[in-house]
Amino acid sequence: MKIDLHIHTSTGSDGALPVEEVIKEAKRRNIGFMAITDHDSLVAQEKAIALTKEYGIGYITGVELNGTFPFQNKAVSLDFLGYNFDIHNQPLLEKLRVMRERREKRAQEILEKINIEFKKEGRALFTAQDMQNIRESVDGAFGRPHIAAYMIKKGIVQDTQEAFNRYLTKCDVPKYPLSLPEASQLIHQAGGVLVLAHGNDRGGTSLGTVTKDLRQQTRIIAENMIEYINGLEIWHPGHDDATVAAYLDFTRKHHLLSTGGSDCHQKPIIMGTVAVPAEVAGQFQH
């Protein structure tokens, strides 16, 4: 059975396809157990639950939260995956609403910083109308990929990578400062479990930005995170074999959940391409 517990949609965040198309594609790819994990959004969940039931696909609710983690007097940005929680839990819904509002303000601040770069280059500045145009392209949670897509459309850059390399990394603004204890409380009081996402993804938001040493990473998790999380995302496109082995050993020693997924944003479609063992589904099917 193919398993994928890390998938994004355009309905809830920065995926390229709406939830209806994502579930249809999952069925075509013979995925038997899955989760939609949109950034700071549960908008796609009810439709995902209904469609996976219709198609005979096992499903657990999901969300991806960005949290801040204090390490050596510095705030480190990490992502966490919430699973198997009540999508109608009011404290969780209210916090996600606040976080989405922050995303909107953050996008405006990013555009203001990009305009500083445009001014240096003698380029026409982004206007309020540009902001409105970008906003109208957003179905779910407002993120930097939406700005990148607009820059491509305007001919400012050739592709998403150029948008990040030239502007979006330099002009980034912090997301809502959700702490790990707060993220943990939100998911646990909604009846779910919390998992550290892509902990050693060298190109992403991960402990890989703190240290590349796997022993040090697992030590950081053991000493600073283990009381707040229930597991680690082990199988991920950004993880090599050494990471998988080290993280799997850690979860077994500490009796934690082991999860995995493609982190698919449908750019391109890679759903179901990460080899996640069948026993991962069994952890949730009791």
Image: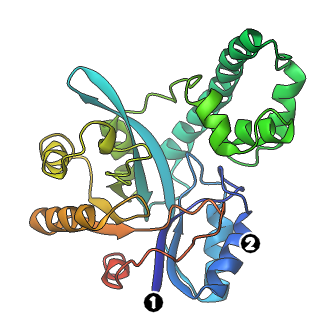
| Residue at 45 percent of width and 89 percent of height | 1
Q: Is mark 2 on a helix, strand or loop?
A: helix
Look at the picture and state if 71 lies above or below 142.
Answer: above
Is residue 141 in view?
no
Q: Which of 105 and 89 is in front in this view?
A: 105
Q: How many numbered discs?
A: 2
SS at mark 1 in the image? loop
Q: Quadrant of residue 29?
A: bottom right
Q: In this view, does 127 lie to the left or right of 248?
A: right
Q: Residue 21 carries which label?
A: 2
Give how far across and how far down residue 118 sits, in percent.
75, 16
Height in image: 240 above or below 162?
below
Q: Foreground: 231 or 160?
A: 160
The quadrant in which residue 78 appears is top left
Label 2 neighbour load within 10 Å: few <14, some 14-19, many 20+: few
The amino acid at mark 1 is Met
- Residue 43 visible: yes
Q: Give the image location of residue 255, x and y in percent.
A: 15, 66
Q: Give residue 242's position: percent from left, percent from top.
A: 23, 64
- Of the numbered discs in the image, which one, if any, rests on residue 1? 1
Residue positioned 63% across, 29% down in the render:
166
Q: Quadrant of residue 48?
A: bottom right
Given the image, on which type of amino acid does mark 2 rest?
Glu
Identify the residue at image location x=34%, y=82%: 277
Quarter of the image containing the C terminus? bottom left
Residue 91 located left or right of residue 52: left
Query: Which label is found at residue 59?
Result: none
Q: How far apart are marks 1 and 2 (CA)?
A: 20 Å
Quick one: 252 or 115, which is closer to the camera? 115
